[in-house]
Image (tube, rainbow, N blue to C red):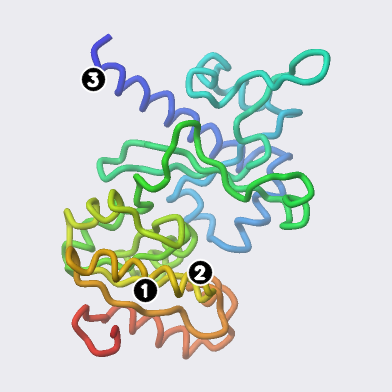
Amino acid sequence: MTALQQHIHHQKITKDVVRACQHLLLTSPKAQGARKYLDSRLSRSNQMLWQMGFFPPDESIEELISIVDKEVLASLTLYYPRFLAGGSAPHGHFSEHNLVMPFHNVYGDVVAILGRSLLSEEERRDGGIQKYKYTAGCQKDLYVYGLDKAKSAIIEKNFVIGVEGQFDCIALHDKGIRNAVAFGWANVSKYQMFQILRYTNNIILMFDNDEAGQKAKTRVKDRFKGDANIKLISPPEGFKDIEEFFRRSNDKVFVKRVIERLLTLEINGKENQ
């Protein structure tokens, strides 16, 4: 099998898994918690557009295996034995991070899958479980979430709005602000920056309103000021991030004004300083 054939095959089986997880999100009784969480944050149309899915816990992994052969899952390191005292048991890579979403490169290829735990912060702490988990071998600093969907708008407007979280990116696109991407953390790696620079050298950073986010965007600007024209803005005061603002603000007039401002931003405008 040639390298091209291997790539095509890998993309096919990876996308098969993504579609299977989408199906389980809509149909599995075990996915009720995931559906409730997503419905509180995204419309059903956005859930499907961004290919949100449900990866079942180990006790119901057969739901996924009934759609995608376990040898295929094993080849993607999504299914493997978990060794326990006295033996082993089947284990899914995202068994504790059941809400999953794919990452695409600018050509639409799936380059990684991200899983999110639906446990509370206290439950995660007690169980030693991280909030997020990526596919094996994934380096999140290599990817820019949403760039495949945003690139045309970035070229048209000649600037990009960069946020931390995937839900922030989706929320902006939902409001018509389609030149938005997410870096997945309170930072921007040189690899992420180089991907952005293929489309524009004008960047507006809108990181979270916490201390880490506010410090990070200044650090990013200082690091890349020789490569790009970077401006800093913040989500509305009183909200952690822009997605939370859109979801929780009761001031419809203010929400509309914020959307209009983001739609009409100018990279050289004084408001972005």
Q: Which residue is mark 2?
A: 212
Residue type indicated by callout 2: Ala
Query: Which image quarter is the C terminus in?
Result: bottom left
Amino acid carrying label 1: it is: Thr
Q: Which mark is residue 4?
A: 3
Q: Is residue 95 above or below residue 88?
A: below
Residue sitting at 25 percent across and 41 percent down?
107
Query: Relative to the observer, which residue lies in front, 215 or 47?
Result: 215
x and y, in percent, of residue 13 in the image: 43, 24
Number of marks in the image?
Answer: 3
Residue behind mark 1: 218
State the image quarter where residue 233 is shown: bottom left
Decide which of tag 1 and tag 2 comes sooner along the chain: 2
- Can you give x and y, in whole percent of width and height, for residue 172 in the image? 40, 68
Instruction: Look at the numbered discs 3 and 1 and tell me whether their residues touch, using CB distance below 8 Å.
Output: no
Position in image of residue 104 (x %, y %): 36, 43
Q: Nearer the viewer, mark 3 or mark 1?
A: 1
Callout 3: helix, strand or loop? Answer: helix
Corner quadrant of residue 8: top left
Determine crowd level at label 1: few under 14, some 14-19, many 20+ residues with C-alpha closer than 10 A.
some
Which of 30/78 is in front? 78
Q: Is the residue marked by circle 3 packed among few (<14), some (14-19), or many (20+) residues within 10 Å?
A: few
